[in-house]
Image: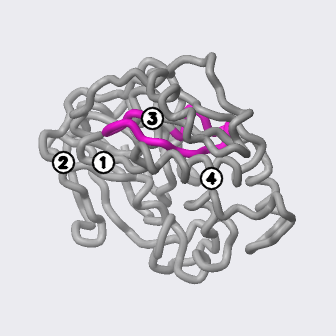
Amino acid sequence: MNYEGVLKKMQTENGSPIQYYLVFENDFLNVNQLLDKKVAINFLRYQCLNCGLQKKIYRQGFCYDCFFKIPQAADWVISPEKSKAHLDIEERDLEFEKRVQLEPHVVYLANSSSVKVGVTRKSQIPTRWIDQGAHEAIEIVEVPNRYLAGITEVALKDHVSDKTNWRTMLKNDIKDENLVEWRTKLRQYIPKEAAEYYLENNSETNLQFPVLKYPEKPKSLNLEKTPFYEGVLKGIKAQYLIFEDNTVFNIRGNEGYVVSITVN
């Protein structure tokens, strides 16, 4: 079987285990069905996710020109505390920014490589946790806009990490944590503006990833250096494909790359 298209982050469906899907323009693939099969990935060309042109990808699946122009790549996306739509201030496209920033957001704790704090739109739960490879997560506050979530995250990351160690996450070299206790401990550091939105009655969400074998020493596949790779798929976690020889391939990190995928 052969599939071809531009890579975008895998769509997911929470279950036991989580189901992963690669969606191309003319193809649709349930990646779980490829476990224990030989999969070949062949890099063909670039295709910017915004303009659709065959231009080298700069970041986040966008070419250089689009990355510095479109609202989907503005600073507030990575740094929510820089959001200004609640003040009616435009950065790149106020209509888009209001649509995204002025909807309910959640600040959460997730355990992927260790306990970390993060921000996402409420509508992206549990997708965001799945994409980060968290096996357990819990909400701390639910606020009406991205700015409040951002300043809460900034305050909390003085006391807990906001990063994921991807190697530790993929090796599954992690331990279970009591996230309810973590949430209670961090409550005192929530900014006054967000304090009324604290959540104290919800419980942890646990996630199960489809992995048959975790890599002992994960090595990342770089399509620019290795445009063709073939290996036996042993697992899927976060947005990574995990292969039998310890090679791991980050789908999210290769958005905008056009590939052919052959399954034997």
Q: CA distance from mark 2 to mark 1?
A: 9 Å
Q: CA distance from mark 1 to mark 4?
A: 23 Å
| Tag 4 secondary structure | helix
Q: CA distance from mark 4 to mark 2?
A: 32 Å
Q: Which residue is mark 4?
A: 150
Q: Which residues are magenta?
A: 110-128
Q: Kindly check if marks 3 and 2 are in contact, taking CB atoms under 8 A apart as contact.
A: no
Q: Which residue is mark 1?
A: 166
Q: CA distance from mark 3 to mark 4?
A: 16 Å
Q: Kindly check if marks 2 and 1 are in contact, taking CB atoms under 8 A apart as contact.
A: yes
Question: In the displayed structure, would residue 38 be above or below residue 198?
Answer: below
Which is nearer the eye, 203 or 168? 203
Question: In terms of sequence position, does the residue under pointer 1 or pointer 4 come before the other?
Answer: 4
Magenta-drawn stretch contains 117 = yes
Q: Kindly check if marks 3 and 4 are in contact, taking CB atoms under 8 A apart as contact.
A: no
Q: CA distance from mark 1 to mark 3?
A: 14 Å
Inspect the image, locate mark 1, and give the three-letter code of the amino acid beneath it: Trp
Q: Is residue 166 left or right of residue 73?
A: left
Look at discs 3 and 2 and give the one toward the viewer.
3
| Tag 2 secondary structure | loop
Q: Which residue is mark 2?
A: 218
Look at discs 4 and 2 and give the one toward the viewer.
4
Question: In terms of sequence position, does the residue under pointer 3 or pointer 4 come before the other?
Answer: 3
The mark found on residue 110 in the picture is 3
